[in-house]
Amino acid sequence: MFSVSRSNYIIYMKTIIKIAKAELQVMFYSPIAWLILVIFAFQAGLVYTGIFDENIRRVSLGWGLYNVTASAFGGRAGLFSIVQSYLYLYIPLLTMGVMSRELSSGSIKLLYSSPITNYQIVFGKYLALVVYALAITGVLGVYSIHALFAIENVEYSIIFTGLLGLFLVVCAYAAIGLFMSSITSYTVVAAMGTLAILALLNMVGSMWQDIEFVRNIAYWLSISGRADTFIRGMITSEDLLYFLIVIAMFVSFSIIKLQIGRQKTSFVVVCTKYVVATVILLGVGFLSSLPYFKVYKDVTYSKINTLTKSSQEVMSKLDGPLTIHTYTNYLEKNYYWGLPNQYMHNMKLFENYTRFKPEIKFKTHNYYHKAKNEHLDERYPDLNDKQRIDTLIKLSNWKFPISSVEELNTKVDLASEKYRFFRVLERGDGQHAVVRIFEDMFVQPSEAEITAAIKRMVMELPTVGFVTGHSERSSTSLQDRGYQMIAQERTFRHSLINQGFDFLDVSLDRPISDTVKILVIAEPRATFSAQQIENLKAYLDKGGNLILASDPESREHASPIGDMLGVTFMPGVLVKPTDNFQPDLLMMRPTAAGQEFSYHLKTMWRNKYVLTMPGASGLEFDPSKGFDATTLFTSDSTGSWNELQTVNFIDDSVTRDLKIEAEKPYPTVMALSRKINGKTQKVLVTGDADWLSNSELSISRTDVWAANYSLISTAFYWLSDEEVPIDMRREPAIDKNITTTKTSWMFTGFGLKWIFPIGLILIGTLIWIRRRGR
């Protein structure tokens, strides 16, 4: 029995292959198949050679390359990303005659009268299309092979997964085209029908998003961007199954259509077959989209599609349920992010987290309340909140409920967030943390901000205390000298409150609370009392960490604290005269010791960024207090000195007094540490307090690439014992160079752009001539 079944199976498969061969002969003996290949090769060649032209130019100019493989094939301007955008134009031209030709010529009747089954006909035809899909993928493979030899330490896995994704796209398009070709004898109608189905599958993801159950299915049905994950170097079970299900669905539809043509069937039975096939396949697909059933494989070297190790460690500590609440105020300017059509995009934002915790739930809360929105204030100045929301509901045709603040049953303090759009991460025990959006070009939170919020809930993060009472810089002040932007500005991505820190004001009139892990004293402008010094000393003797930021004007008030640390604030102001800026503006790069001290400063050095300090004192260090010191920044060794005479740097000129003003580097930022009470105490001392002020972080100077954030991240990461901000480092990319020279590329590039497409033209022409000869 087994041998008979096996023999029948072999005959069955041989028939499918025979049909596929016949279809391939027709296909490749026609000019359309070759024309598609030639045009596709020419377009792909233009894109690929353009990318490599840019790489050659950058190398010749001495500019560095980074992550060459991903940039050449992925991203917005990569080869695979661009060719994916116009693949849909080619396939309908290829598939429009696969079955339509049989229907229009009447040869379908010969197939019906033969012992060949409907399955064999469809599978044979589709197998031929799959072979053609391999040919299209092979065109891209030519450029991929060149990249394997031209890119040093090439990430071949990214290339192969990208090719797999595009191959699946072509196969899915081909299955759709096959079905459309089977329902009409007109090839043009088949082509237009295929384009219509593809357009529908691209748009369906944005349809019915205000209906909770339907939106999940509609979003899953969307084919738009399905190959993007493959191109990025990520294989997911959801996307892989999606293509296989779409292929199976439309191939099944084609078989059903042939069955209808072969034997008379009632309309009810036909509809039932289509519905059953659709429901089964869509059901499997929908289940595959649920987080519990998803499987991921990140093939990139740096694992750029996966949470960093730091984030994964945080997630491993997050036990119990987690709900992400989205609060949207529809009278606030950022309401767009909370619209129902953004729901699935919001879920995608957290997909890397649901990968490690699939039980995460999402809830939305829509409400209205007066908020900052200049547009509404200008357009509806005389309407109250209720009238405004009613007007917007009518104009926008919103069908979802929007509550007033009074009707919204929530324990979250909406007022503290100024009624802006934000999210709340809530654990089962009610513990919660806020994730905000920001007023920058990216708007949405990144992994750093999301992980910092989660980390708040799984461990105790540092509280930063700002000393007050002596006109110090304040963490809540919006003035130019204030520190609100870097400390507590909720709309600023890099503010410490968005990176995991809490804050409070500290008075030295009483002992400092044990909850304060980092104390900040920034430019005190009055003398500390003996009691205040005693309380500060007690804090330091317990091993508390400290930032002491002085200014030339506050030197005498900060000096008593500096003396406890072994640091002296030198009299005078450090200067370096330039043509474009005031002489007391220092622009400094990290020292060699600073680069070793922090990866933030090493990155800062590599990118040629600078730290700006407008008016700074030099620092001197005495190790007798038990601290070790690392100098992170100094003034320049040439053209810079400690000015002891000039005070007015606007009206007076600056000239170095050779007798008393030495031209040499002076330390401006020092990191001190010592062992005390079984722990390492850490202190950062700076000769300037403006480097992290609102004005200095906001100002833009011509041709000055300031990156004061690098020192801010360095300081607080170090002082918090490397807890926050979250360490977002990954394994650095290894494909940072190309082996192709400018001379060799002249010939190789010409061959890829012109010789290869011309070669395809010649091959197609020879085959066509040979066929005519026969």
Image (cartoon, rainbow, N blue to C red):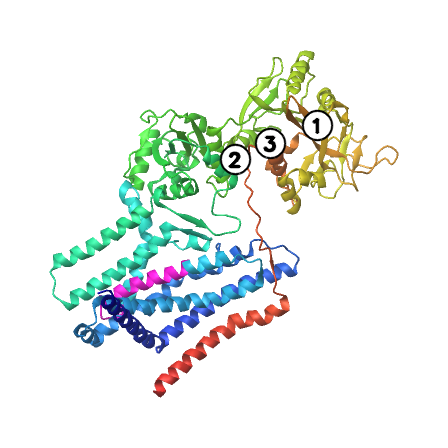
Of badges 1 and 3, nearer the viewer stands: 3
Total residue callouts: 3
Type of amino acid at the residue the image marks with label 2: Phe
Task: Report which residue position mark 2 lands on.
Answer: 492
Question: What secondary structure prevails in the magenta region?
Answer: helix
**x and y percent of residue 732 in the render?**
58, 48
Residue 551: mark: 1
Range of residues picked out in magenta: 165-188
Label 3 crowding class (10 Å Cα cut-off): few <14, some 14-19, many 20+? many
Tell me whether circle 3 and circle 2 mark residues in contact (CB < 8 Å): no
Amino acid type indicated by mark 1: Asp
**Residue drawn at 47 percent across, 53 percent down:** 233
**Of marks 3 and 2, which one's residue comes earlier in the chain?**
2
For this rendering, which residue is in front, 695 or 184? Answer: 184
Q: Which residue is mark 3?
A: 716
Q: Position of residue 534 (x, y in %)?
A: 67, 14
**Sequence order check, earlier mark of 2 and 1:** 2
